[in-house]
């Protein structure tokens, strides 16, 4: 895949309205791409995909997938 392809995928992820669903999906895809493409910049991809339309940039910290899933479970059980 080329950079243009990665941008296309990240832009498609921006269509997910729920921020928690977008975060989880983005991280799952980023992990898969990183496994296939050693030079893939996971943090840059996540930051780009998590940007809301019209927002210049976003600061995201990469929390482990298991921790994020647990946080979602806790939130759903509240």
Image (cartoon, rainbow, N blue to C red):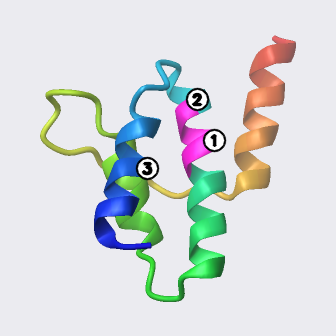
Real-space Cα distance between discs 1 and 2?
6 Å
Whether tag 1 and tag 2 are in contact, CB under 8 A, the answer is: yes
- In the rendered image, residue 63, in percent from the top left (x then y), is placed at 60, 55
Real-space Cα distance between discs 2 and 3?
17 Å
- In the rendered image, residue 67, in percent from the top left (x then y), is placed at 75, 49
- Give the magenta part as a residue range: 22-26
- In the rendered image, residue 15, in percent from the top left (x then y), is placed at 42, 26
Instruction: Identify the image quadrant of the C terminus.
Output: top right
Circle number at residue 9: 3
Q: Residue at x 37, y 61 (%)?
A: 5
Q: Is residue 42 above or below residue 38?
A: above
Which element carries disc 2, helix, strand or loop? helix
- Name the mark nearer the viewer: 2 or 3: 3
The tag earlier along the polypeptide, 2 or 3, is 3
Mark 2 crowdedness (10 Å alpha carbons): few <14, some 14-19, many ≥20? few
The residue at which mark 1 appears reads as: 24
Q: Is residue 41 above or below residue 46?
A: below
Residue 68 occupies quadrant: top right
Which element carries disc 1, helix, strand or loop? helix
Horizontal arrangement in the rendering, residue 29 relative to residue 40 (left or right): right
Q: Residue at x 53, y 20 (%)?
A: 18
Residue 35 occupies quadrant: bottom right
The residue at which mark 2 appears reads as: 20
């Amino acid at each position: 895949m080329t950079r243009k392809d990665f941008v296309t995928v990240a832009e498609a992820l921006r269509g997910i309205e729920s921020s928690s669903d977008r975060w989880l999906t983005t991280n799952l895809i980023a992990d898969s791409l990183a496994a296939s493409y050693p030079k893939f910049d996971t943090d840059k991809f996540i930051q780009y995909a998590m940007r809301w339309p019209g927002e210049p940039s976003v600061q995201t910290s990469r929390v482990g997938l298991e921790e994020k899933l647990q946080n979602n479970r806790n939130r759903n059980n509240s």
